[in-house]
Amino acid sequence: MRRFLLTTIVGVFVLVLAGGESVSALVGRPSGDAANNNPESEAPPRTYAIYRASGPIAVDGRLDERDWAAAPWTADFVDIRGRDAPTPRFRTRAKMLWDDEALYVAASLEEPDVWGTLTQRDTVVYYDDDFEVFIDPNGTTHNYYEVEVNALETVWDLMLLKPYRDGGPAVDAWDVRGIDAAVHVQGTLNDPSDTDDGWTVEIKLPWSSLEEAAPGGRPPQAGEQWRLNFSRVDWPLAVKNGTYEKDLDTTKAHPEHNWVWSPQGAIDMHRPEHWGIVQFAGAEVGTATVSVDERPNRRVKAALRRLYHRQRAHHEAHGTYAGSLSALNASNVQLPERDFAPTLRTTQTMYEIAAPGAEGTTVHIRQDGKVWVTGE
């Protein structure tokens, strides 16, 4: 029987755990209009073209294949909160490849003190320093994957039916069948007596698992786009009796650092609408340059997301969802390139907002945050 993480666990993550440790990856509840309280709400997501591998990829953490050398790096990771937050102390960046069998993810993490303690599969890996991958194949913000790896190659993988803010459970018993993850440490693991350069991680994610929530229940095709993000959790350390210990400021809800590829606007990775956009290129790596194009309904989805946040604020204030668009001040949500003409249907416990999209499509969003397109 599959186990589900209790949704009440969300509230626990703002508390101080045993030893003063807080948990980062699951916290964060948006309130009010995201355009006002989230500085990244209008920022475009980061993008990346994933090229095809020209041959087999040996997952050993070293990234010394010719294909990895040819694959472009992402932009350097930034603080999860976005543009006004401090620059990360250490550089982090990632790259990706794909073939008919799997998605391959690699990352380089600068780190003078490489350490890890957790060795059991599916423990909460971000209690250690870790690298995390988040994948939303359908772009609906529902049914997405989370994979975490620490420097000891310990994996935690789970599936989220919807974000925690929307009451979604996490299927902790879900596994990426056939996952392969390897780490190479440039230095010495768990040795405070020297200064390390960092660590590289390499992950193979077979389509046979990822296609479970993918469009059509199949691997991607060239030209398709998925939503994806990366995160790095970095804990402050002290050395006591020759070993590393966390050096926590228990006055902070988040004493750890959270660095990501595409900023979230809050310390909350579970805002899939802010994740990056990856496009699967048909070209082999190193043979062509592919640009990631903006799909015409992306901005319509973002506009509907603003109304979703306003409905959340209305429900928190009044106990019901607004029954009219005027109550949400929808008229001040505009799109520069097209008319934005949403319609609203509301019951006592649910709502759906729809708006015309590109090429005769309609874009929808509902009270649990799911966004989808009909008429394609």
Image (cartoon, helix red, strand yellow):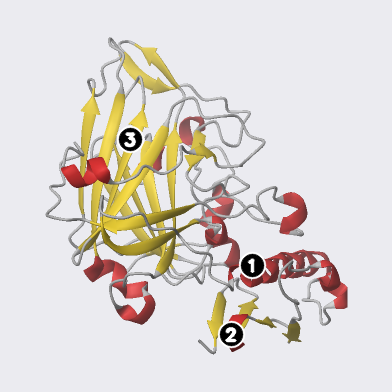
- Element type at marker 1? helix
- Residue drawn 51% across and 67% down? 141
Amino acid type at circle 3 is Ser
Q: Which of the 4 quarters of the picture holds residue 33?
A: bottom right
Q: Is residue 278 visible?
A: yes
Tell me what residue is drawn at x 55 percent, y 78 percent.
Answer: 372
**Which of labels 3 and 2 is toward the front?**
2
Q: Residues within 10 Å of mark 2 (few under 14, many from 20)?
A: few
Q: Which mark is residue 108?
A: 3
Q: Horizontal and vertical percent for residue 161?
A: 45, 70
Tag 3 secondary structure: strand
Res 66 → quadrant? top left
Marks 1 and 3 close (CB-CB < 8 Å): no
Left or right: residue 66 versus residue 258 is: left
Say which mark, if any, is on residue 359: 2
Which residue is more in the foreground, 216 or 165?
Answer: 216
Image height check: is 375 above or below 256?
below
